[in-house]
Image: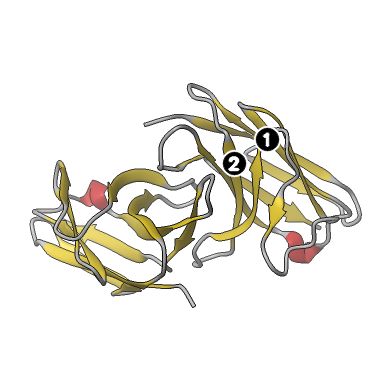
């Protein structure tokens, strides 16, 4: 059975305190590993797609990496506006489209 | 990123009524649209996948007669919750996928059934 597990469930950081979020997965037919940010009461906002082990992508204070079994979202010197729930999802090949299976998310709170 | 809109953003209805939610891709053609529901402090659960002009494919456990999905054009999909009951109260989110692998999501619709 395809599974996506995120840890920690919640993380509280002080501004400037770097950390990493983990997403481990067991799937067959992987068609991309996706990271999204979700603010309360809103839909997920796309951050990154990773396709192959060793791939890395960066955007401002965020950097996503991928291995064969897990992905990390590194947050460098976070600011309070980075507070959100970060979701990872694996894309499963359905032939015509990529169906996403989401992890339960990591709720990040960054304080001053 | 691509933009997806949803309407309404919030709806309150009485038990037994039907509610329609619209999802539009504003700056791309969504050949495939996905509908999710999300309960408080939980992740997104896929309900169904629809391709333009075809019948939707529902996930196991999702009643197709209760959650009617229409994907009439490359920019519009609708979800109708028929005979809604309090247990249908949730946050409904649509996602659109075009000629690339990423899904882009709408802002969500908060449904409350009294």
Q: Which residue: 83% across, 61% down?
A: B85
Please count the marks in the image: 2
Is B77 positioned to the left or the right of A59 in the image? Answer: right
Residue B36, percent from left and from top: 60, 54
| Tag 1 and tag 2, C-beta contact below 8 Å | yes
Q: Residues within 10 Å of mark 2 (few under 14, many from 20)?
A: many
At x 35% / y 50%, what residue is drawn? A37
Give the side of residue A68 with respect to residue B59, left or right. left
Give me the chain letter of mark 2.
B
The numbered disc on residue B77 is 1
Per the model, the C-alpha gap separating discs 1 and 2 is 7 Å
Classed neighbour count for the residue bearing mark 1: other residues with Cα under 10 Å, few (<14), some (14–19), many (≥20): many
* Colouring used for the render: secondary structure
Task: Pick the residue in front: B17 or B74.
Answer: B74
Q: Where B96 falls versus B34 (above or below)?
A: above
Q: Earlier in the sequence, mark 1 or mark 2?
A: 2
Q: What subunit carries mark 1?
A: B
Q: Vertical placement of A52 versus A48: above or below?
A: below
Q: Which residue is mark 2?
A: B33
Name the element at disc 2.
strand
A93 left or right, relative to A26: right
Residue for point 69% across, 53% down: B57
Residue B56 position within the rendered picture, expressed as x and y whole percent measured from the top left: 72, 47
* Residue at the farthest front position: A95
* Residue found at x 73% / y 39%: B54
**SS at badge 1:** strand
Label placed on residue B105:
none
Place of residue B51 in the rendered image (x, y in percent of width and height, measured from the top left): 64, 39
Q: Is residue A87 left or right of residue A97?
A: left
Most foreground residue, A3 or A53: A53
């Amino acid at each position: 059975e395809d599974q996506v597990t995120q840890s920690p469930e919640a993380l509280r950081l002080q501004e400037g305190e770097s950390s990493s979020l983990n997403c481990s997965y067991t799937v067959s037919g992987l068609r991309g590993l996706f990271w999204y940010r979700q603010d309360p009461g809103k839909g997920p906002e796309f951050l990154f797609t990773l396709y192959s082990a060793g791939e890395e992508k960066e955007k401002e204070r965020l950097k996503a990496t991928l291995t064969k079994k897990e992905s990390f979202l590194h947050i460098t010197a976070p600011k309070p506006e980075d507070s959100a729930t970060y979701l990872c999802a694996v894309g499963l090949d359905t032939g015509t489209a990529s169906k996403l299976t989401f992890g339960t998310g990591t709720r990040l709170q960054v304080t001053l | 990123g691509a933009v997806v809109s949803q309407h309404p953003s919030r709806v309150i209805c009485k038990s037994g009524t039907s509610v329609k939610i619209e999802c539009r891709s504003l700056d791309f053609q969504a050949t495939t649209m996905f509908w999710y529901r999300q309960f408080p402090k939980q992740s997104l659960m896929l309900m169904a996948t629809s391709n333009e002009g075809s019948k939707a494919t529902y996930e196991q456990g999702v009643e197709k007669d209760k959650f009617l999905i229409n994907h009439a054009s490359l920019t519009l999909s609708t979800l109708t919750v028929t005979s809604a009951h309090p247990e249908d109260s949730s946050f409904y989110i649509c996602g659109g996928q075009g000629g690339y692998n990423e899904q882009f999501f709408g802002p969500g619709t908060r449904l409350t059934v009294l």
